[in-house]
Image: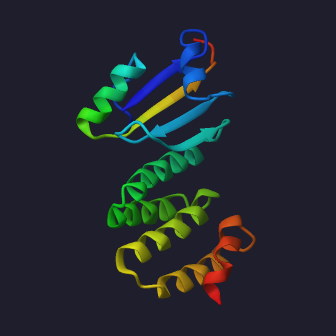
Amino acid sequence: MLGNWKKDVDDALAEAKAQNKPLLIDFSAAPA
Amino acid sequence: MPLEAHIKEHPAWFKRFDALWTPTILVMDAGGFERSRIEGYLPKNWFRGRLELGLARVAFMHKKWENAERVYADVAEDYADTTVAPEAIYWRGVSHYKATNDHTVLGDVAKELAQKYPGAEWTLKSVPWAQ
């Protein structure tokens, strides 16, 4: 459903802007 | 597109986006503006409904009224057994009104909410439309 998970917030924001797509940020403390 | 921010790996991102609790999910628009925030755990179906509500909000805030109305309508139908549904119906009506300037839709929405979701917060918010 969500596609590839991004690794860096600034890169993700830039990519979202370039592709004119929304960005979902999941803030987690779940054990790996 | 999704991005995971784990508190042990990226504590600065928590501070940057005012994430004070986990889980917190932000739906950002392409311009980097926060359009929806989900705090706390939800069952899978409820979470998906609230996430889609966030995407509808992105369209709404960009004044893409017809797109927003369509997504809100889908959420209202697909998640009818969750508390997301009355919120989606409310904003579906607002989106339609914004697109058409036809205020009669708001009265119809108020009736629909009173019938389907009596006592829901969004039903109460629609009460002035029924008068």
* Residue farthest left in this picture: A18
* Corner quadrant of residue B80: bottom right
Residue B80, can we see it?
A: no
The number of discs equals 0
Which residue is pictured at 43% across the width and 62% down the height? B74
Q: Position of residue A10 (x, y in %)?
A: 38, 21
Q: Is residue B60 left or right of residue B82?
A: left
Q: Quadrant of residue B84?
A: bottom right
Q: Measuring 55% from the left and 23% from the top, which residue is drawn there?
A: B16
Front residue (pair B69, A17): A17
Image quarter (top left, top right, bottom left or bottom right) of the N terminus of chain B: top left
Picture quarter with the C terminus of chain B: bottom right
Render colour scheme: rainbow
Percent across and percent down for residue B67 are: 33, 61
Image: B49 above or below B118: above
User: Where residue A31 appears, x then y in whole percent?
Assistant: 63, 13
Image: B88 above or below B105: above
